[in-house]
Every structure is written in structure tokens, then in C-alpha cells.
Image (cartoon, rainbow, N blue to C red):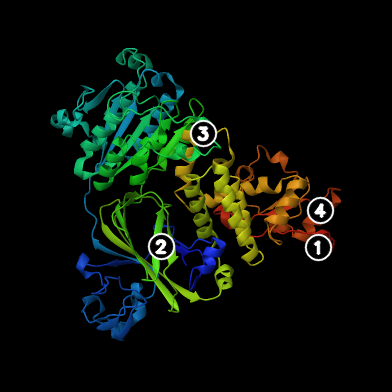
């Protein structure tokens, strides 16, 4: 197991009968660019990457060498290989340990040095009459201006398009010239070809692009240009134009929309009635409108030419987010849906800064044993074949969850998996990163449960719940997850944190906030489908809300869901023990409280043991309720190292 690849246990059961009996998922989770150094192996070309001549598996420590540097048996297909690689010419002299691919689980081959690759970004801005008069429009423009100034370079070209009842391109040179195009049934792009080179600009024109943003912020001038026409915008037509302008070169589209898409191509029908919530029709709310395939076709084309689409949408009653956001889903783009006139400027700035990708033109291929089937994959991607998946970009926290099933009974003692990820770095070099994982096979289900991996299992159950949420009502889907929780409670070893993480997940607003609109709920669904490792830190703060319950809830929770030795004494007083280096503002956010005044006593863990802490609290004449211990100051999931339940006898022992 590693930060990059994780199975939901370190052991693989030899058949899936017990897994089916207890509805336990079997998953492999991959986070290709987790924060860890990876050995880089320089080769001259793709053909120089050492691979099995039969199954094309990459060289790994699973290969059995018969003659060092000359002949080996592939650990994946068991065929004998004798192909000579110049890289292994002196293996007998240097030893196997001198080759990273023969000693590490994760490594990468670099077969093309950095080159001057050109990147293109098109920014689509809704300048419809109603939207430009809002605070959201101003905040979005200020944020985009900051984003462009931070990202534009000599090799990064930017194009600005504004759209309302028509489409406007900006030809930027010594002066800025507006090119206006009406909405027509044909493709607008055929009329923009003569201007192609002059509408994309790089850092040489940074001052001009800043002046353009300033002019777009002149609201009175913009109102005159829209001719006081409140009919909405031609979002679909503009998106098609942006996709055509990027053409086969690919790039990034950042789209901003704050009003109804009521003109031109891709006009959407009215939303499904929100009264469907908690009815058998509820799953329809989270599904795209399949009667309109305009956005799906654009999404497929974008994925084919490596164009990623990000959408920043301001909710309104005529905006159908599940339908238009398919472009984001198939290109691994970012989707943000904001409530009108309530989103702070800083939030938008942060959301835009998170767009920066780590890798481009990515393709993943999974090699699994013949007794393992891939049932489905969760994440944002485009599937080319049953084992090949492509994404225009990947960010550092991009994660994919492969749901597996066992075909018959496994008669081997070990199962070997290998991922290959081809990608291009931001400086243009081409690489293939290889991930290897080997799992021991056991006939005892308890071995599987004893070695449970919290992160992968949480994502497995989360993905199951999200799939069920598109088949059943939200209440039914979370109920099924809680059934799985009880299963895990009965089978897990004492002290596992999995039940409490799952309970925290069940309290997520996606499942419980009945005030959420359809579009806001869909955005949360989209976000949860990223399965990023950082999601755990979203569930953990909910623990505070879980443990601050009344006596009735406490009894129900402890008796039916939570194993002993996981929690702490609970009454009505919260006491937190924290290390000295945790900032108060961070502690306030982690505990989901408006003020630290709600926490009556904060005791420094570095200078106070639990026994002394309890004694201190007793001296305050307060009934001890919760001692919540946080360790370290890196990622929050690493901080929650221990939580204890003290019954009265244990409490007396400490004193």
C-alpha cells in the first residue's frame, strides 16, 4: 500500500461469497500524483521502456530474473523474456538494487525532454443584462483578472469571449477591437477563422488584457452594449465556439454563467419539479436531461481533443446544472455552483486558483489478474475501453476508485495489479508513471477485515452511496450505507476509526440538508465524486457534531453503530486537548464552531497528560464530558489519532 495506490485491505479474500453476504465492496483506489517523490528513469524513447514482450507489463520487482540483465520470467503472465535492454547491460556488476523499477512500487519513465508546448485557455463570460448588475459579476471579473495575471505566460495564451444575446471576441493589439457575431444556426467558428491569431494573447499583452477586464467592469457601459435586453444568454452557442476555437490542439475552457441559457443552441427545458424530493421520482433530479444531447456531444468532442471544461455557475431557476455539466464530468473539469449574491470574493479567488493542473493529456490503463473483474470506476474521466481511461488534465488530488469483483475462486497466494499512467508535464516532457500493488490472498474474511484501509473503504462506501442516490431517494441511499456501517461494526477489530468516519459521512449536507436546491445538491454530488483524500477532512469535523448529541442520541449511537474504545465520555461539556502549534482559527474551523468561547477549556497536550487533564477539569468542578485529542498540524486526518470512551470505572482509575 502507498499514498498512490490503495486496496481497501492489505489482504484479498480468495472468493467473494463473504463479501456479497455482508455487502462489503472490493476496491482499488489510485491517486496518481499524491504528495511524494517518485524515482525518475530517463530513457531515449518509448520503445526503450522495459516491458514484457507478451503482456506488455512494465518492468517491476515482480519479474523473476533467470540471468541478470538478460533473461527473466514475467510475474504477470509467466512468460519467459530474453529481449536485451541496454539499460540492464551491467546488472550483474551493479546489482538489482541499483534500478528503481526493480525495488520501488511507484516510479516513472521519462522518454521526451521538456519542449516549448503552447497552452491555450478560453474564458467565457456571461455579460447578459441581468447578470452584469449583480455583485457576483463584479467578483467573478476581479477573480478572473487575478487568475489571468498569475497564469498567463509566453507559452500560455488567453482568449476572452463575452456573450449575451450575441457573442463578442476581442482582437487585442495596439488597440482593442470588438468582433460581434450574431446567434445563427450554423457554427459561428467558421466566421472567426480570419481573426484566430489575433484573439489569443500571451504575457506580452498583459497590460491590454488588464485594460479589457477594467472595461468589462464598467457596468454602465456594459448595460448600453447589452441594449437593456433581459432575454438571457447564448451559453450553448458560445461553448460550441470555444470548443471549435481550441480545435485539435486542446486547452482549457473556463465558463461563467449567471442567467438562463435561453438563446441559441443547447436551450434547456425547465427543471424537474423540486417536489420530487423524498419521492420515487427523486433520482431524476440528479440526472442530465437525455432528451437534449447537445452538451453531451460537446463533452465527448472536448475529451477527444484534450480540452478540459471548468464551469462557474450562479444558480437560477432556468439553469439546468446536471445537463450542462457533463462537459466537466467527461473532461475532469471543476464545477462550482454559487448562490446568487452570497459568495465572498475570496472564495471565488480560491476556487479559481485550484484549477491549476499537474499533468496534461493523461491516459490510465489497469492490468489486473484474470480472476479479477472491473465492474465500474468512479471519478471524472472518459472511458475509451474497458481498461483504458483518459483525462485532459489531472490535479494533485485527482482520485479514481475501481470497483472489483472476484471471478470464481482464487487459487494463487498473491494477486498482482499494475497501473500505467501516460501524461505530459507542464513543461512539455512526456512520462509514463507505473504503479504496482501486490496482495496476499486469504480464505479467512477476518484477515480482510483486520487489515482494513480507512481511506479506500470510505471512498468505496461513498461511491456506492452516490450511485444509490441516483437510483433511490437520498434517505434510502444513506440508510443502505448505515447498514454497511453496522456490518463493519460487527466484523472490524476494536479501535478502528472506520465506523465514526462513516457516521460523519452520513451527516454530510448532501444527504441531510433539505433546504438545498437541485443544482446545489448536484454540485455536492459532483464534488463527492472526486474521492479526493481531502474528503476525509470534510467528514472529520462532523465528528464534533456527532459527539455533541443529547443522551437519547448517545444511547442509540453507542448501542447500534459505534464500537467501544473509539469515543469519549459524552455529557454536555466539550473539553479539547490540542497540541501547541495548532492555530486557534484552524481549531475553530475543524470543530465547526462559530467561536472558541464554545470550548470552555483548551489544554495544551504537550504539557498535560490525559490523567492530569482530567484532574484539572475535576478541579474546575465540571463534569468531564469530551476529551478530543488532536495530534500534529499537517492534514487533519492525521491529527485524529486517538479517541477514547471512558466509562465511570475507567474515569475513576485515571483519577
**Can you tell which mark lies on residue 650?**
1
Are the two marked residues, 3 and 1, in contact with CB atoms closer than 8 angstroms?
Answer: no
Q: Nearer the viewer, mark 3 or mark 1?
A: 3
In the rendered image, residue 288, in percent from the top left (x then y), is placed at 39, 38
Name the quadrant containing residue 284.
top left
Q: Who is closer to the viewer here, 580 or 475?
A: 475
Q: Alpha-carbon distance for marks 3 and 4? A: 53 Å
Q: Alpha-carbon distance for marks 4 and 2? A: 45 Å
Q: Secondary structure at mark 2?
A: loop
Q: Secondary structure at mark 1?
A: helix
Name the quadrant containing residue 404.
bottom left
Q: Nearer the viewer, mark 2 or mark 1?
A: 1
**Can you tell which mark lies on residue 276?**
3
Residue 654's place in the image compared with 177, above or below, is below
Name the quadrant containing residue 196.
top left
Looking at marks 3 and 1 on the same chain, the residue that comes earlier in the sequence is marked by 3
Looking at marks 3 and 4 on the same chain, the residue that comes earlier in the sequence is marked by 3
Q: Quarter of the image containing the C terminus?
A: bottom right
Q: Secondary structure at mark 4?
A: helix
Query: Which residue occupies 32% across, 34% down?
Result: 292
Q: Who is closer to the viewer here, 273 or 639?
A: 273
Q: Alpha-carbon distance for marks 4 and 1? A: 17 Å
Are the two marked residues, 4 and 1, in contact with CB atoms closer than 8 angstroms?
Answer: no
In the rendered image, residue 52, in percent from the top left (x then y), is placed at 26, 74
Q: Alpha-carbon distance for marks 3 and 1? A: 50 Å
Residue 110's place in the image compared with 221, above or below, is below
Query: Which residue occupies 80% across, 56% down?
Result: 614
Lateral position of residue 113 relative to residue 33, left or right: left
Query: Which residue occupies 44% across, 21% down?
Result: 134
Is the residue marked by circle 2 packed among few (<14), some (14-19), or many (20+) residues within 10 Å?
few
Q: Alpha-carbon distance for marks 2 and 3? A: 49 Å
Instruction: Identify the residue position indicated by label 4 in the image.
Output: 616
Amino acid at each position: 500500500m502507498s499514498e498512490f495506490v490503495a486496496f481497501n485491505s492489505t489482504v484479498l479474500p480468495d472468493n467473494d461469497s463473504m463479501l456479497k453476504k455482508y455487502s462489503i465492496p472490493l476496491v482499488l483506489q489510485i491517486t496518481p500524483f499524491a504528495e511524494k517523490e517518485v524515482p525518475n528513469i530517463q530513457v531515449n524513447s518509448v520503445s526503450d521502456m522495459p516491458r514484457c514482450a507478451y503482456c506488455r507489463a512494465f518492468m517491476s520487482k515482480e519479474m523473476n530474473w533467470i540471468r541478470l540483465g538478460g533473461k527473466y520470467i514475467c510475474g504477470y503472465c509467466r512468460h519467459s523474456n530474453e529481449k536485451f535492454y541496454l539499460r540492464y547491460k551491467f546488472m550483474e556488476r551493479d546489482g538489482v538494487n541499483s534500478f528503481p523499477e526493480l525495488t520501488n512500487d511507484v516510479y516513472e519513465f521519462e522518454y521526451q525532454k521538456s519542449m516549448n508546448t503552447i497552452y491555450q485557455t478560453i474564458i467565457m463570460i456571461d455579460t447578459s443584462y441581468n447578470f452584469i448588475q449583480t455583485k457576483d459579476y463584479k467578483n467573478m471579473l476581479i477573480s478572473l483578472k487575478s487568475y489571468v495575471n498569475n497564469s498567463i505566460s509566453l507559452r500560455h495564451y488567453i482568449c476572452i469571449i463575452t456573450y449575451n444575446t450575441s457573442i463578442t471576441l476581442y482582437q487585442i493589439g495596439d488597440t482593442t477591437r470588438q468582433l460581434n457575431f450574431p446567434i445563427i444556426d450554423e457554427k459561428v467558428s467558421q466566421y472567426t477563422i480570419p481573426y484566430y491569431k489575433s484573439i489569443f494573447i500571451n504575457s506580452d499583452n498583459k497590460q491590454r488584457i488588464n485594460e479589457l477586464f477594467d472595461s468589462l467592469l464598467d457596468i454602465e457601459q456594459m448595460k448600453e452594449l447589452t441594449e437593456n435586453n433581459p432575454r438571457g444568454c447564448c451559453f450553448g452557442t458560445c461553448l460550441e465556439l470555444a470548443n471549435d476555437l481550441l480545435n485539435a490542439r486542446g486547452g482549457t475552457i473556463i465558463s461563467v454563467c449567471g442567467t438562463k441559457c435561453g438563446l441559441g443552441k443547447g436551450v434547456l427545458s425547465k427543471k424537474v419539479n423540486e417536489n420530487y424530493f423524498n419521492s420515487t421520482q427523486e433520482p431524476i433530479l440528479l440526472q442530465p436531461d437525455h432528451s437534449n444531447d447537445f452538451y453531451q456531444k460537446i463533452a465527448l468532442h472536448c475529451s477527444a481533443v484534450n480540452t478540459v471544461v471548468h464551469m462557474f455557475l450562479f444558480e437560477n431557476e432556468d439553469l439546468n446544472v446536471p445537463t450542462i455539466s457533463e462537459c466537466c464530468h467527461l473532461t475532469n473539469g471543476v464545477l462550482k455552483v454559487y448562490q446568487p449574491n452570497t459568495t465572498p470574493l475570496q472564495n471565488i479567488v480560491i476556487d479559481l486558483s485550484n484549477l491549476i493542473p499537474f499533468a496534461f493529456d493523461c491516459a490510465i490503463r489497469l492490468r489486473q489478474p484474470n480472476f479479477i473483474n472491473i465492474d465500474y470506476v468512479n471519478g471524472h474521466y472518459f472511458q475509451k475501453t474497458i481498461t483504458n481511461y483518459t483525462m485532459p488534465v489531472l490535479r494533485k488530488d485527482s482520485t479514481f476508485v475501481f470497483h472489483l469483483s472476484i471471478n470464481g475462486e482464487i487459487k494463487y497466494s498473491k494477486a498482482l495489479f499494475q497501473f500505467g499512467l501516460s501524461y505530459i508535464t507542464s513543461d512539455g516532457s512526456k512520462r509514463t508513471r507505473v504503479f504496482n500493488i501486490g496482495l496476499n490472498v486469504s480464505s479467512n474474511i477476518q484477515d480482510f477485515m483486520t487489515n482494513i484501509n480507512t481511506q479506500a473503504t470510505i471512498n468505496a462506501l461513498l461511491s456506492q452511496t452516490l450511485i444509490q442516490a441516483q437510483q433511490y431517494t437520498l434517505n434510502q441511499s444513506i440508510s443502505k450505507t448505515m447498514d454497511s456501517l453496522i456490518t463493519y461494526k460487527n466484523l472490524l477489530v476494536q479501535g478502528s476509526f472506520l465506523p465514526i468516519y462513516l457516521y460523519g459521512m452520513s451527516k454530510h449536507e448532501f444527504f441531510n440538508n433539505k433546504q438545498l436546491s437541485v443544482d446545489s445538491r448536484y454540485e455536492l454530488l459532483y464534488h463527492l465524486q472526486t474521492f479526493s483524500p481531502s474528503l476525509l477532512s470534510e467528514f472529520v469535523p462532523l465528528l464534533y457534531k456527532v459527539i455533541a448529541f443529547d443522551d437519547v442520541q448517545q444511547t442509540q449511537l453507542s448501542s447500534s453503530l459505534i464500537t467501544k474504545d473509539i469515543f469519549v465520555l459524552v455529557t454536555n461539556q466539550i473539553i479539547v486537548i490540542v497540541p501547541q502549534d495548532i492555530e486557534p482559527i484552524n481549531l475553530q474551523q475543524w470543530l465547526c464552531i462559530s467561536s472558541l468561547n464554545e470550548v470552555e477549556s483548551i489544554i495544551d497536550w504537550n504539557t498535560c497528560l490525559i490523567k492530569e487533564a482530567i484532574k484539572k477539569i475535576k478541579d474546575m468542578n465540571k463534569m468531564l464530558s469530551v476529551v478530543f485529542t488532536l495530534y500534529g498540524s499537517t492534514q487533519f486526518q492525521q491529527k485524529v489519532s486517538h479517541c477514547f470512551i471512558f466509562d465511570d470505572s475507567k474515569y475513576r482509575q485515571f483519577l
